[in-house]
């Protein structure tokens, strides 16, 4: 078994928290803003120069439930990998 320190655990916890915050907060809200911008562009008159641009991708980020499920799955996979070595 390899050496595992508290410092390593803290680093992994910090990195995981950062990724989960980004997935739930920043990206989810960016997706919601893209939805609204797409709606605004659809309401523009056809002669407006912006009315024929490609719609923004609005399926960004994850819901809090998806993030929790991903964290649980990650822990289960880590435990299974630890048991197999």
Image (tube, grey):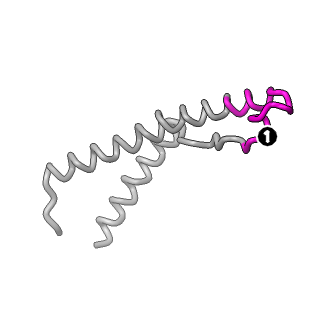
Majority SS type along the magenta span? loop
Q: Where does residue 45 sit, x and y in percent of width and height?
A: 84, 27
- Image quadrant in which the C terminus is located: bottom left
Q: Where does residue 18 sit, x and y in percent of width and height?
A: 35, 41
Q: Which residues are magenta?
A: 37-54
Residue at the extreme right = 46
Residue displayed at 67% across by 33% down: 35
Task: Give 47 or 40, whichever is nearer the viewer.
Answer: 47
Residue at the extreme bottom = 85
- Label 1 SS: loop
Q: Where does residue 84 sit, x and y in percent of width and height?
A: 32, 71
Number of labels in the image equals 1
Residue 13: image quadrant is top left
Q: Tell me if 21 is positioned left or right of 60 in this view.
A: left
Residue 56: image quadrant is top right
Residue displayed at 51% across by 38% down: 27
- Image quadrant in which the N terminus is located: bottom left
Q: Where does residue 54 sit, x and y in percent of width and height?
A: 73, 44
Q: Tell me if 72 is positioned left or right of 1 in this view.
A: right
Residue displayed at 80% across by 27% down: 44
Task: Give 67 or 82, whichever is nearer the viewer.
Answer: 67
* Mark 1 burial class by Cα count in 10 Å: few <14, some 14-19, many 20+: few
Whether residue 49 is in magenta: the answer is yes
The image shows residue 70, relative to residue 82, as above or below, that is above
Q: Which residue is mark 1?
A: 52
Q: Tell me if 33 is positioned left or right of 74 in this view.
A: right
């Amino acid at each position: 078994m390899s050496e595992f320190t508290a410092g390593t655990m803290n680093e992994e916890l910090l990195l995981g928290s950062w990724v989960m915050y980004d997935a739930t907060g920043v990206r989810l809200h960016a997706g919601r803003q893209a939805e609204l911008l797409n709606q605004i562009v659809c309401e523009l008159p056809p002669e407006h120069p912006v009315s024929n641009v490609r719609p923004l991708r609005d399926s960004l980020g994850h819901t809090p439930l998806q993030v929790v499920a991903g964290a649980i799955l990650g822990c289960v996979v880590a435990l299974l990998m630890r048991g197999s070595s």
